[in-house]
Amino acid sequence: MNASARTGRWSALVAAGALLAAATVGVATPALAAGPSSAAVAAARPAPLDRAALAAALHALPADVTGALVRVDGPGARWRGTSGEDVPADARFRIGSVTKVFTATVMLQLAAEGKVDLDGTVQHYLPGLLPDGYPTVTVRQLLNHTSGLPGGGGMTSGDGSTAWFAAHKADWFSPRQVVKDMLTQPMNFAPGTAQQYNGNGYFVAALVIEKVTGDDYADQVRRRITGPLGLRATYVPAADDLTVHGPHATGYVDVRNPDGSTSRVDVTEQSPYPWAEGGMISSAADLERFFDALYRGRLLPPAQQAEVFAVPDLPNDHNRNCEIGPTAGRACYSTAGLLRTVLPNGTEVWGKNGSRPGYTTGVFATRDFSRSVVVGLNPTGITGEEFPTLWKLVTTGFGSGQAYGA
């Protein structure tokens, strides 16, 4: 699938959990910084949780969403629910572009260690990857979607249909293949002049991670994040690992047949080729623990922690997600790949969404983590039809119940 079409739908975030400081072998465990003071976090508190409204929204799934899971946490706002076909309460699922937040966190840790300069260029770290004559692109621009790099390419998306994906669901495309495919398209804009959501930048970012560490991207995520935090349901699958290990809901896509009828195809097993851009698997509880640690400053020292919520002051260029709320028309993604928006009730939330065929994740929280909402859906389409359902569940979890586009 086209990365920009597939992952540009919306954001996911997450909530509370204790940090487990487990030592790992071969790589120094990153220092765990103290969390930000309450004075540093200025945002309206979410409204009291309306459990009846949340349950009603959860059980009103449209026909093209076969299952859903919701996890809400915060003082006086703990709630869990599932709906639809065989969704375990502890389900693991493909998190799609929520993977980007893991990738950005690893990069920010490397910046804290002096191994990466966020204002250093791709041309410096990966000489020859981009063609001669390309403008310089910085690491920071890869992470905050201001690189201007092409967002598409045809190799990994085919014709963009569910039928194409069902026929190619086991195909693996290496990161350098994806970049090569990307470079068949023109630049979108001059680097640093606008923000346009671009998953391809995260393929490049992960190649930088591997170059400066001399290590595999998956191992860096395990040693720096999932191991120390005790995220046992969270991992980067190997290239040939098509399975969702552990309890999980089945993912389907609806495929149009030549005669006009529709068949529902099981795509639970599929290639994890989106890799550092969108290939990880996790659970709601694990995502909550990871985002809690990230938001509270337990994974990064202060200078890099500031980047987690740093959104560039630039125009939005075709980011549908940046057209929601009072900052519409301006950039809305931070250096950590988090999306910021303000709900009609005044609650500022930060988060990330992610989609793979059969699975869509949404995780959002207030910056001080006083409320977090994790949503997992099992949609049968691949062009974002489920977004209104996702957004309704997320916003209801914050006491807003904002309709999509409001």
Image (cartoon, rainbow, N blue to C red):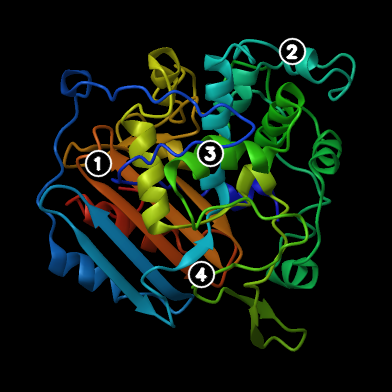
Q: Is residue 199 visible?
A: no
> Which is more N-terminal, label 3 or label 2?
3
In this view, 299 is above or below 133: below
Distance Cα–Cα, label 4 vs label 3: 24 Å
Please name the amino acid that badge 1 sits on.
Answer: Leu
- Of badges 1 and 2, nearer the viewer stands 2
Residue with the mark numbered 2: 136
* SS at circle 1: loop
Distance Cα–Cα, label 4 vs label 2: 39 Å
> Which is more N-terminal, label 1 or label 4?
1
Please report the residue visible at 36 percent of the width from the left and 75 percent of the height from the top.
Answer: 61
Please name the amino acid that badge 3 sits on.
Answer: Phe
Residue 18, given in percent of the width and then of the height, sits at 30, 43
Please report the residue visible at 67 percent of the width from the left and 11 percent of the height from the top.
Answer: 120
Residue 102's tag is 3
Q: Nearer the viewer, residue 102 or 156?
A: 102
Residue 379's tag is 4
> Which is more N-terminal, label 3 or label 4?
3
Please report the residue visible at 66 percent of the width from the left and 43 percent of the height from the top.
Answer: 218
